[in-house]
Amino acid sequence: MKADYLWGAFASPFFVRETGVAITDWEMADLVREVCYDVGTGPLALGGAMAGYRAFADAVGTGARFPYVIVGVTDASQWEAGSGMLDGEGRLARTVGASSAGGAAVDFAAGEKRVALALHAAWARAVEAHDHAPPDLSAIEAALAGKQAASAVLDALAGVEAGADRLACFTGPDSVEAVACTAFARSLLDDADAAAARVTLGVQNADGGWTVGGDMLPDEDGARTLGGPSRRWSALHAASIVSDDARIGGGRISGIDDLAVADGGTGASTAAQARANLGLGSMATQDAGAVAIGGGSAVFDSFGVVTTGDPYFHRHSATAGSGAGVLMRRARGTSGAPAHVNASDVLGGIYLGGYQSVTNGFTGGAAAIYAYATEDYSSGGFGTEIALATTAMGATNRSVRVRVGDDGFRPAANNSYTLGSATNRWSVVYAGTGAINTSDAREKQDAQDIPDALIDAWGDVAWRRFRFADAFAQKGEDARWHVGLIAQQVRDAIDARMGEGEAVRLGLVCFDSWEAEAEERDEEGNILRPGRDAGDRWGLRYEECLALEAAWQRRRIAGIEAALAQLSGGGGDGG
């Protein structure tokens, strides 16, 4: 039956070692277990070691005999135990000892089976029947009880002559000699602990105080310390201290006031005088907050500040023009021999960058405000301009957008940037003169007369009086009235005469739309950019509207004059 084999109780050479019995040349190994999917009554192909176990081929050699057990998983009623070996193809060749087939080789069906190297009951019964128990040795054990085994050490001790005030002393593994044991040595031997021994030696009083008669010297020069970091003397009282390297921490030595700088001191008895003697100035007085550098300038090859808060400059002055500023100066040459800057040299600036995760590093100056020379500097002139540069979305190179110089405020590139946008408009533009628009014939094409249909459509446009809705929301009835045109009415009038969509093909009718944008705030909750809803807006270029109005009026006036000429007598000039 299935209980006639042992799954793992004897699956180790330990059984053989502990019993001292070996009745078979079977080979044993631990933790050997494989799956099997082969079928039939002959040799079975093994399918690989199970998790945590070894394969048979890794544990036993080809041709070596070992005990095995097979248990069906797919068909749990099939099992087999016996001795086996691995054939030349690595299959399990079986000699059956017990099985679910009545002791015959089981004709294993398809499906999973598990094969283990494990001793079974038949082998254990054979061991028990082999009768290799050791003889009864109890009489010998009783005779040797309490006896010490013979050895070279005992022989050496036997040769030592005993005597008063003498001790046996081992001088080697197998050699012993007698040495004198004085009364003083015996007084140490009967001390119960180290404290009592120190009193016997005279280095400590019975109350715990230390006493030393004469000089106390280390065994080597400079090789021993007096106390340690965790075992310190509470105080040191001495008539004099002579040392090449005396260190005093957490206190002072009375009587020493001004240890010279040359001797490793500050030459002072106060902190202020010590700073003056060492040339530290006032910076050494600051352990938090602002650090002041007085009496000169600090020169650095590079200077960086890393902070989790906002750095700031704070200046106290009663003078109106004395603000908290940063002075940046540029020179060619070296610090020892500076030379004048040349035109286009950058004098200084503020360069802003951020950390990005692609290369895991900070960007260069993604945005910048900087000043540069517009001429070679001399005592007669040092022209300067300021530039403002940004990096466009999706780009990595910074470009200058605006320049400020002696000729005014201007874009860095011609006809490339707008002043405001459809969603971010200037409320009012104050100017000494009107805007100048490009009207050069060399920059125009397809110049032609205004179509009569467009002039006819303009005759349908109505000039209106109105108030702006946002002004009325703020001021109510105090909001002022304006005179002008309504963009949608202009659009509809032109489309009605010329066809749907024709109005927006004219530059005088403008339409802008935008997507919604979420509000953006900084880490402290301050609004960086307000949110906005998606929307659109119609607009007009009034200079073109007025030009079309003038064309309509010209044609109308010409018609009136022609009609008057007809009434006054026919063609000609009339009169």
Image (tube, grey):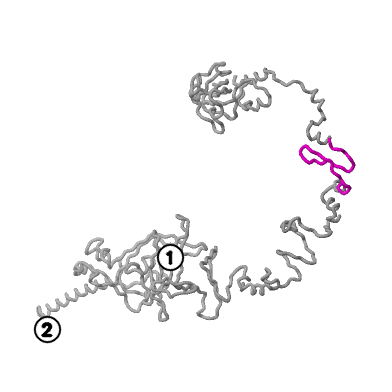
> Residue 457 location, x and y as percent?
22, 67
Q: Nearer the viewer, residue 560 or 271?
A: 271
| Amino acid under disc 2 | Gly
Q: Residue at x 54, y 64 (%)?
A: 307
> Residue 67 location, x and y as percent?
58, 23
Position of residue 501 relative to residue 104, above or below, is below
Q: Which secondary structure, mark 1?
A: strand
Position of residue 196 relative to residue 272, above or below, is above
> Residue 445 location, x and y as percent?
22, 67
Q: Residue at x 73, y 72 (%)?
A: 257
Q: Which mark is residue 49?
A: none
Examine the structure image and report whether residue 232 is included in the region drawn in magenta. Answer: no
Say which of marks 2 and 1 sits in front: 1
Tell me the CA gap for discs 2 and 1. Answer: 73 Å
Q: Which residue is mark 2?
A: 575
Q: Quadrant of residue 202?
A: bottom right
Q: Which residue is mark 1?
A: 367
User: Magenta residues?
Assistant: 159-186
Viewer can see residue 194: yes
- Figure quadrant of the C terminus: bottom left
Q: Nearer the viewer, residue 563 or 454?
A: 454
| Amino acid under disc 1 | Ala
Mark 2: few, some, or many residues within 10 Å (few <14, many ≥20)? few
Q: Residue at x 76, y 57 (%)?
A: 218
Q: Quadrant of residue 333?
A: bottom left
